[in-house]
Image: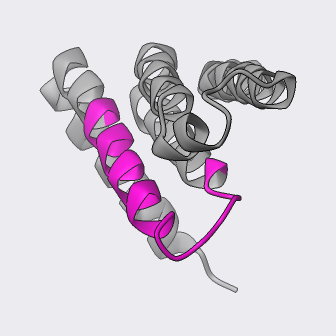
Amino acid sequence: MDYSHVLYLHALAESFLDKLGPVARYALATAFSLFAIEFALTLSLIMEGGLIFVFLAAVIVSAIYGGVGPGLVATCLTSLAIAFSPAHMQTSGFQGFSEKMQLGLYVILAICLSFFKSYMIKGKTVL
């Protein structure tokens, strides 16, 4: 399969964000996070569980297009959304060990994903 059009769109988006500067990257990370929070709240009306992947998608996109800083901003915003989500507050008040472990694992995974882009760039420069 030919994925050249996807690579072209990715390069176009990166060059556009490079011209706008760091403020646009952080604004984009915040917008992605808020969209993911709203989308997860909407999905929670018809689905149970598994919505953490929506938040991870926001972190991944923020890290890829914004870098480490915007990825960490997305991690903070989505972690707060998970911690204070209505589902956690209604079921156990976020008191259970299981909920704390899930949040902790999410934060660790999201932080690792935030640093993914910088390691990807270092790998390209070495090759």
Magenta-colored stretch includes residue 25: no
Q: Nearer the viewer, residue 66 or 103?
A: 103
Tell me which segment is drawn in magenta.
29-52
The residue located at (26%, 40%) in the rendering is 31
Q: Which quadrant holds the N terminus?
A: bottom right
Q: Position of residue 64 (x, y in %)?
A: 51, 37
Q: Position of residue 41 (x, y in %)?
A: 41, 56
Q: Nearer the viewer, residue 86 or 101?
A: 86
The residue located at (48%, 18%) in the rendering is 76
Judge whether 121 appears above or below 13 on screen: above
- The part of the image, by quadrant, that contains residue 2 is bottom right
Magenta-colored stretch includes residue 46: yes
- Check the image and name the residue furthest to the left: 20
Q: Nearer the viewer, residue 34 or 63?
A: 34
Q: Is residue 22 left or right of residue 50?
A: left
The residue located at (37%, 39%) in the rendering is 33
Dominant secondary structure of the residues highlighted in magenta in the image: helix
